[in-house]
Amino acid sequence: MKAIVIAGTTSGVGKTTVATGLMGALAEQGLRVQPFKAGPDYIDPTYHTWATGEPSRNLDTWLLSGEAVAELFNRAMAGKDIAVIEGVMGLYDGRSSTNDEGSTAELAKLLGAPVLLVVDSRKGARSLAAMVTGYRNFDASLKLGGVILNGIGSDGHLELCRAAIEHYTGVPVLGYLPRREDLSLPERHLGLIPTVEGPSNQDFLKLLVAQCQATLNIPRILNLSAQATLPPAEPRLFPREERPAVTRIAVARDRAFSFYYQDSLDLLQSWGAELVPFSPLQDTNLPPDISGIYIGGGFPELYAVELAGNRPIRQIIKRAARRGMPLYAECGGLMYLGKSLGDLDGNEYSMVGIIPVSSQIDRPRLSLGYRTVEALSDGPILRRGEIVRGHEFHWSVLKNKTNGDSAYRVLEKGGYNEGFQKANLLASYIHLHLGSWPPMAPRFVENCRRFRECSQNGGRR
């Protein structure tokens, strides 16, 4: 099995551009490419899927155990020819400043996969060799198999960089991307713009893939990827045989809500859920015969006018929650379930109103990082006292929040209460990967099944 990790010296050096272009170039050769993203990112994977036609999957060595990472990786690779794994931040950046926990380096070593290091060469030449020397020597157990130079200005610049790096480090330069504005992916306040919003087009993808075919050494990259020594895995998260559907769960999927881990969705399906997409932007009713709702993260602040204008779906979701239907919401979903949402310009719009808080975008206050949370009560996916790992990344803040009905106790930053939990409703800024604690997915499915059974029996259990 072939696998290659695309890492960067730091954030912003072009990892996603290189990874997406390489994925597309390999797919153009007829290879079945399985894309992955290191860390808790929701946006970069949309570009991977765009290039390959395959759902990109997150592999996070802090959120997930090593056994879980190996299981998810091996499961996704069934029937595939090669894995291309885009790293997170810089190669050695992760949870801690004193170890490689949660880093691209830790993931590459766990998977036994060689690393291609993307280096921003726009303002350097011979000095890049010193940089690559440092990355190669920092962890001798890591297989640094090659360098991709991004931002090359000319043939002469390329040769200066290539000669210096290969002379001083012995690490081969396996390709480059030129300094071209039309090869830059679109960004805004939380990074790249998700492809679900339609900023990208096939012309751009064709241009990027053609560039990678012309200036990346695809045969040598394929030879390097064949050096991967991947770990075996036993099923710990998924049932050995997929369960038949016992419940239908409505999943919010549109431009406003698109942040989901593909493996979380697969886990719900494998444990007996039929997942039915719906749009809080456009649909005026929930899908028929559902017994649970899942509203992930996204950018509701960009679509607050449309969300507020769709009053029928807001009222129906509110009634469903009051009836006790299991409802799980993360970040953007939390904002949507509140009383109101303040957009980027400070305008306030009515939302579902099932949670007694309002949200407001507050640009100076970015909440970002891994979080460990303890459930404060029994709910649709967790039991009181259970501790799981999650991640948050948002510019918004909650107004009128009290500690009553909090979902979690966050164990970092001195400890504080977070989220909202009441009966079968759980909403939080914390994103959870359902593979981080094996009982979560089957428990949500079972709670939805019980609600369905109770509803069919007229409320009698």
Image (tube, rainbow, N blue to C red):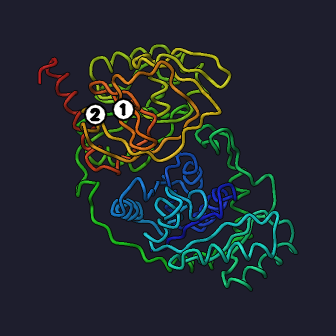
User: Is 438 in front, or is 455?
Assistant: 438
Residue 429 picture location, percent across and down = 46, 34
Going 50% across and 66% down the picture, which residue do you hit?
Answer: 83
Q: Residue at x 44, y 23 (%)?
A: 337
Residue 323 drawn at (x, y percent): 27, 18
* Occupied quadrant, residue 265: top left
Left/right placement of residue 77 relative to residue 87 reads left
336 and 21: which is toward the camera: 336
Q: Which residue is mark 1?
A: 328
Q: Residue furthest left?
A: 461
- Are discs 1 and 2 less than 8 Å apart at CB? yes
Is residue 96 found left or right of 275 in the rendered image?
right
Vertically, is 360 above or below 73? above
- Local SS, label 1: strand
Q: Position of residue 258 (x, y in %)?
A: 51, 38
Classed neighbour count for the residue bearing mark 2: other residues with Cα under 10 Å, few (<14), some (14–19), many (≥20): many
Query: Around disc 1, counting alpha carbons within 10 Å, would you say few (fewer than 14), some (14 to 19), or many (20 or more)?
Result: many
Q: Is residue 26 above or below residue 287?
A: below
> Does any portion of residue 38 appear in the rendered image?
no
Nearest the camera: 386 or 287?
A: 386
Distance between the alpha carbons at the discs numbered 1 and 2: 7 Å
Viewer can see residue 103: yes
Residue at 67 percent of width and 73 percent of height: 147
Q: Amino acid at mark 2?
A: Pro
Left or right of residue 8: residue 207: right
At x 81%, y 63%, the residue is 122
Residue 185 image point, x, y percent: 70, 49
Badge count: 2
The kind of residue on which mark 1 rests is Tyr
Q: Earlier in the sequence, mark 1 or mark 2?
A: 1
Residue underneath mark 2: 380
